[in-house]
Image (spheres, rainbow, N blue to C red):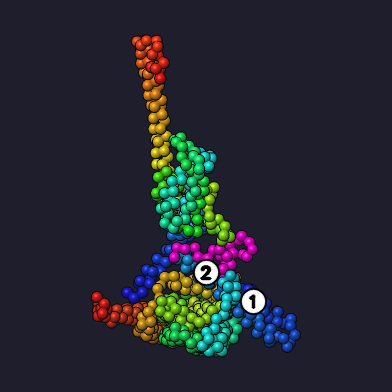
């Protein structure tokens, strides 16, 4: 724990406010109830908090995309039964109600059990991924030694359920869509995991808590402010876009080709569950990126530490990451399947391996003065060579029309 | 360089996002029911009949010639001529429509009726929010609801109305001049005749005077 690094005990107590609150609540209960109450007090805030964040981010996403496209975005639904529009903040409630009362269509030929189970089971890994992320000093649901490994293991199981949904729907688009989703997720899992190697090497641990502890102090101790950390963060960020099925990697639901992909036979609340799981996956990825590269729950400057609980800084960073996800979605068009695969295997994977090497050099360079230029040169050189090589290798030529004309 | 296009795109969208809060140009949305919609002068929705003055019935320009009824492509105009006549704007006696109905559900807003009317009596309105809470109400628009004052035309089609008003004012002026000229001529004629009669009567025998006077 990083309590030892905080010199002022009063500040430490300010940071520990939430932890103390929970303990004081539990201590009032009889012995038998303490364990379940403690579990409940961990699960409920996470579930409610992230579900609220989901609702708010759908609103923010529509609003932000609207502004990017010179539109207003949702601005009609406000507080029910009043004239207050509140910039359309009531929209998520209306959306949720709409999803709840919509007809739930199950295709006649579908595998009914799997079709029903897939969206429900999908929520389990989506929420489980949140269980190892440290949200504040001492606020981590389960502090296991191999937290990072657990996170990726849980994240990988969503692929199975997406395929489940596609298979159970008995629809060619659903099947094709889920196959594409799996191809994409497996391809991007490699650079995603390899780009975290550098952090593991630096922290010398797989535990997310000790990775955050390694970044205590000021902004400069964050992993993102090292050459390998910056490159690793960018690679991780791109891969997490792909893992979360976000634009420009939202191939599984290319409307013009496979309509809604594996979601095609889902309607009503089941669709909403898929949607929610997708967003929860996005938050989990954002949370992991914060933990690994952006200093976790630490404030950017030491003098800010302790005034506000670490959870505040964590949420602030998460919101920033979500906003950049939205920004990217408003900017990039969707990639083609072959472009996606090329990018994953020919660029992302070699780059992430180079970053691992750079992290090794940094470790033995003995100080940032030598480490910075060495690592930066290695990473930038690899980047330059790869991009030039890929441009050359494209070998574009005029298209020959054999039958037209 | 790989990725430079991405930066350029991100810059553009950021400019749009920030610009939508500060510049009118980057957020052209009009929040319609709260803000009035800007209606273009040349837009057309549904025809209306123009009347001069304050009396819709007396000032109606339509003379019930039924050209628009015949030309209307979906045949949604229904006119019944009145049996009597009423003076038009220059004082000439003209027939007027006893019934003038247009079916809102059939009209296709083509504006041909306004195009063909030789009496400048029917024009296209720009009012577009004609929605109704009952789907059977207000579909047949009768003469009473079609009639709108000239001021309305001047408001929605200022350029068009200005030309028409000028032409009609000229016609009235010409009519007035003609009337004055006619009157003057008639007066001159009468005077001439009177003078002739006078000279004739002085020349002729007293017995022939009644014949000359007729
Ligand atoms: S606008 Fe066209 S359809 Fe409508 S009444 Fe006039 S001529 Fe008929
Ligand atoms: S509106 Fe015009 S064209 Fe139609 S009947 Fe009246 S005068 Fe004739």
Q: Does the residue labelled 2 lie within 8 Å of ligand 1?
A: no
Ligand 1 sits in quadrant: bottom left
Question: Disc 2 sits on a residue from what chain?
Answer: A
| Residue found 60% across the figure and 79% down from its top | A46
Query: Mark 1 vs mark 2: which is more N-terminal?
Result: 1
**In-front residue for pair A291/B61:** B61
Q: Are marks 1 and 2 in contact (CB under 8 Å)?
A: no
**In-front residue for pair B27/A387:** B27
Quarter-of-image position of residue A78: bottom right
Q: Name the residue under label 2.
A: A60
Asked if residue A83 is among those painted magenta in the image, a careful observer would answer yes
Residue B3 lies, in percent from the top left, at 36, 74
Residue A139 lies, in percent from the top left, at 60, 80
Quarter-of-image position of residue A127: bottom right
Q: Mark 1 points at which residue?
A: A18
Asked if residue B97 is among those painted magenta in the image, a careful observer would answer no
**In-front residue for pair B153/A295:** B153
Which quadrant would the N terminus of chain A be assigned to in this image? bottom right
Q: Do labels 1 and 2 share a chain?
A: yes
Which region is colored magenta?
A69-92
Residue A374 lies, in percent from the top left, at 36, 80
Residue extending farthest front: B207
Residue A45 horizontal side relative to residue A351, left or right: right
Q: What element carries label 1?
A: helix
Question: Disc 1 sits on a residue from what chain?
Answer: A
Residue A178 horizontal side relative to residue B133, left or right: left
């Amino acid at each position: 724990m990083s309590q030892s690094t905080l010199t002022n005990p009063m500040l430490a107590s300010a940071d520990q406010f939430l932890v103390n609150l929970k303990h004081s609540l539990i201590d009032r209960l009889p012995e038998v109830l303490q364990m379940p109450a403690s579990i409940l007090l961990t699960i409920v805030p996470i579930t409610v908090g992230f579900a609220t964040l989901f609702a708010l981010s759908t609103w923010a996403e529509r609003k932000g995309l609207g502004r990017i496209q010179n539109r207003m975005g949702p601005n009609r639904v406000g507080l029910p039964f009043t004239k207050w529009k509140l910039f359309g903040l009531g929209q998520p409630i209306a959306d949720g109600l709409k999803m709840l009362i919509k007809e739930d269509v199950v295709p006649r030929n579908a595998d009914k059990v799997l079709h029903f189970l897939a969206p429900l089971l999908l929520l389990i890994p989506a929420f489980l991924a949140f269980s190892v992320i440290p949200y504040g000093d001492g606020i981590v649901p389960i502090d296991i030694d191999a937290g990072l490994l657990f996170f990726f293991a849980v994240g990988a199981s969503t692929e199975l359920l997406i395929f489940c949904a596609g298979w159970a729907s008995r629809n060619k688009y659903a099947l094709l869509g889920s196959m594409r989703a799996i191809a994409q997720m497996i391809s991007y899992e490699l650079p995603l995991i390899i780009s975290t190697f550098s952090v593991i090497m630096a922290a010398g641990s797989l535990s997310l808590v000790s990775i955050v502890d390694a970044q205590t102090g000021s902004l400069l101790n964050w992993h993102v402010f090292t050459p390998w950390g910056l490159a690793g963060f960018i690679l991780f960020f791109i891969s997490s876009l792909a893992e979360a099925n976000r634009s420009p990697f939202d191939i599984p639901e290319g409307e013009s080709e496979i309509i809604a992909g594996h979601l095609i036979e889902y309607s009503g609340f089941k669709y909403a569950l898929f949607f929610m799981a997708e967003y929860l996956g996005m938050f989990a990825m954002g949370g992991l990126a914060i933990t690994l590269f952006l200093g976790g729950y630490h404030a950017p400057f030491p003098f800010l530490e302790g005034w506000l609980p670490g959870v505040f800084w964590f949420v602030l960073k998460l919101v920033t990451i979500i906003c950049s996800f939205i920004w990217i979605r408003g900017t990039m068009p969707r990639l083609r399947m072959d472009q996606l695969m090329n990018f994953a295997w020919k660029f992302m994977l070699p780059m992430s391996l180079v970053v691992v090497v750079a992290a090794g050099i940094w470790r033995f360079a003995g100080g940032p003065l030598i480490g910075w230029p060495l690592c930066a040169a290695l990473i930038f050189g690899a980047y330059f060579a790869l991009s030039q090589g890929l441009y050359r290798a494209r070998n574009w030529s005029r298209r020959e029309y054999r039958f037209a004309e | 360089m790989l990725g430079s296009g991405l930066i350029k795109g991100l810059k553009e969208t950021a400019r749009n996002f920030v610009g939508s809060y500060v510049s009118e140009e980057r957020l052209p949305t009009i929040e319609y029911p709260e803000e009035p919609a800007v209606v273009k002068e040349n837009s057309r929705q549904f025809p209306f009949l123009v009347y001069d003055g304050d009396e819709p019935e007396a000032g109606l320009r339509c003379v019930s010639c039924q050209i628009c009824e015949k030309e209307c492509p979906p045949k949604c105009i229904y006119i019944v001529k009145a049996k009597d006549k009423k003076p038009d704007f220059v004082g000439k006696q003209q027939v007027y429509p006893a019934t003038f109905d247009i079916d809102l559900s059939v009209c296709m807003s083509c504006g041909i009726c306004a195009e063909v009317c030789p009496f400048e009596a029917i024009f296209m309105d720009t009012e577009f929010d004609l929605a109704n809470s009952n789907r059977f109400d207000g579909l047949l628009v009768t003469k009473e609801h079609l009639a709108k004052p000239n001021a309305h035309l001047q408001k929605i089609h200022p350029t068009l109305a200005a030309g028409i008003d000028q032409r009609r004012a000229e016609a009235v002026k010409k009519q007035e001049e003609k009337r004055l000229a006619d009157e003057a001529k008639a007066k001159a004629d009468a005077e001439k005749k009177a003078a002739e009669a006078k000279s004739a009567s002085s020349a002729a025998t007293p017995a022939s005077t009644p014949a000359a006077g007729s």
